[in-house]
Image: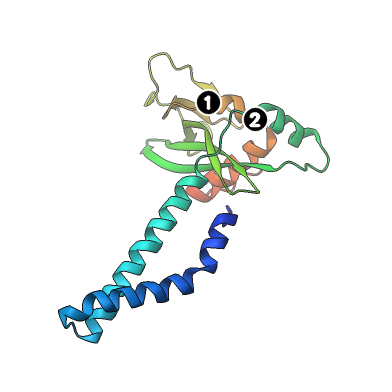
Amino acid sequence: MVCKFIFPKWNIFLMFVPFLSKLLFNFVALTLKPLKMKPLRKVAALAVLLVGIFAFSKAEMSSEKLSLNLDNINVIETLSKQQFECRPTSDFMFYVETDLVKKIRGANNVNAKVYILDKVSGRKALLADENVQIKKFEGAIELKDHSASTNFKSSLIKNGDLIIGNAEVAPYTFNELIQYESIYNSYLNSTNKLLRLKRSI
């Protein structure tokens, strides 16, 4: 599960919320007084303003969390260290999110996105975004219902799932990242939950 973090600057902002709310209430009251509005309408107008302010603040915070800069992060080196260290102490976590794209005869086409998460700031970045075909039963015939570009080369994951296409341009390929244990385990857990499977890690 991805935790939500509040940045330090927002902690400072939240300290002044009561003061700002009172100041805003007084301002609205003085502004609306000449209009001879009923008290209930004044409260409703104030509520709308406050909701707008906090919705805007929340949207800004969400956009910041998605802006992890990969320029100074060696993703492959970080993954390698996590795989071979007994007790990984990395500040980053890798995880996979999956969504069902299409059900076809004998298989499911699933979109898999690989993310890197900065545990300290809560910011994340997309590393890979590709489609995978998962057979519904052993021995099912592979169907050529692929969403890949003409230059895409399909590849098998060690559990038999077939990488069939890139859904979005991303810094890495799914085949490159799925070789690492943390991403493979996350992929299995995510697809098991999505398709109600019981595939062991």
For disc 2, the neighbor class at 10 Å (few under 14, some 14 to 19, many from 20) is some
The circle drawn on residue 171 is: 1
Q: Which residue is mark 2?
A: 75
**Quadrant of the frame with the C terminus:** top right
Residue at image position (81%, 37%) is 85
Check whether the beta carbons of the residues at disc 2 and disc 1 lie within 8 A of each other. Answer: yes
Quarter occupied by the N terminus: bottom right
In the image, residue 52 sits, relative to residue 69, either above or below, namely below
Q: Residue 25 sits in which quadrant?
A: bottom left
Which residue type does callout 1 highlight?
Answer: Pro
Q: Quadrant of residue 104?
A: top left
For the question of whether residue 5 can be seen, the reply is no
Q: Residue furthest right?
A: 86
Residue placed at 76% from the left, 33% from the top?
81
Q: Earlier in the sequence, mark 2 or mark 1?
A: 2
Residue positioned 34% across, 77% down in the render: 26
Mark 1 lies on a secondary structure that is: loop
Q: Amino acid at mark 2?
A: Val
Q: From the top left corner, tell me how far across and down residue 159 is, in percent.
A: 61, 32
SS of the residue at dot 2? helix
Q: In terms of depth relative to the viewer, which is nearer, 197 or 75? A: 75
Q: Nearer the viewer, residue 179 or 106?
A: 179
| Cα distance in 3D space between marks 2 and 1 | 10 Å
Is 120 placed above or below 67 here? below
